[in-house]
Image: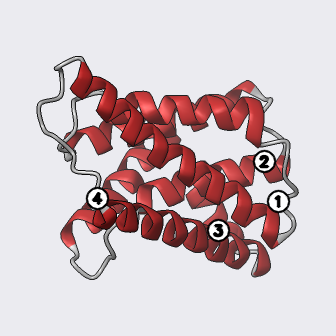
Amino acid sequence: MFKIIALIIFISFLGILEISFPFIPEGLSLIFIFLTLLLLKEGQKEIIKKSEHKNFLLIAFILAGIFFDIYSIFSPGMFFFILLVIFFIADRFLLYKFNFNRPVGVFIFSFLLNIIFQVLIVLVSLFLRFLNIFQIKVVFDEFYFLIILQGIFLNSLLSLILSLFLSRFKLKKIQKIIYYG
């Protein structure tokens, strides 16, 4: 129970930090980077097969989806659905395909996860617009795609840097807080 409360507080803190401070570049998602780091840690240890850790990851993705939906302009439940899909894609297909002990594997995994995230946002929003559920028209111009590419690159790069930092300096206390609540 303590892990879940700590997770809620930490995800809320990241979300408030992301929303409140203007110095954070557009497209950068601290919550998504946190989720990527959780997946990287689980992939490194290969303990995601244990149900307790898988349940913790699933709860983290659910909480992040709810938080994204709270301050999003998109339809309610869209990010919740997208993050659940990403969790299952990562769990079934991506986690065991990369060597997370090498920076290239970490970057490629994070890059693919970010691409899947952005593509799902675009596809689901277009689908909801087609069904007339989502009334806001998203303008897909060069600026929108530039922001998406910037977000993919920044999220992947920051995930790589934080992953290397945490593994390099063996900060056990910080790793326990970040990865296990």
Amino acid found under the numbered disc labelled 1 = Phe
Circle number at residue 76: none
The crowding category of the residue bearing disc 4, from other C-alpha atoms within 10 Å (few below 14, some 14 to 19, many at least 20), is: few
The crowding category of the residue bearing disc 2, from other C-alpha atoms within 10 Å (few below 14, some 14 to 19, many at least 20), is: many
Residue denoted by label 4: 141
Circles 1 and 2: CB atoms closer than 8 Å:
yes
Indicate the quadrant where residue 69 lies: top left
Residue denoted by label 2: 43
Up/down of 47 relative to 15, above or below: above
Element at label 1: loop
Amino acid found under the numbered disc labelled 4 = Asp
Q: Look at discs 1 and 4 and give the one toward the viewer.
A: 4
Residue denoted by label 1: 100
Q: Residue at x 66, y 71 (%)?
A: 160
Element at label 3: helix
**Place of residue 180 in the rendered image (x, y in percent of width and height, measured from the top left):** 61, 49
Left or right, residue 162 beside residue 24? right
Left or right, residue 123 beside residue 98? left
Up/down of 76 relative to 143, above or below: above
Residue denoted by label 3: 173
Circles 3 and 2: CB atoms closer than 8 Å:
no
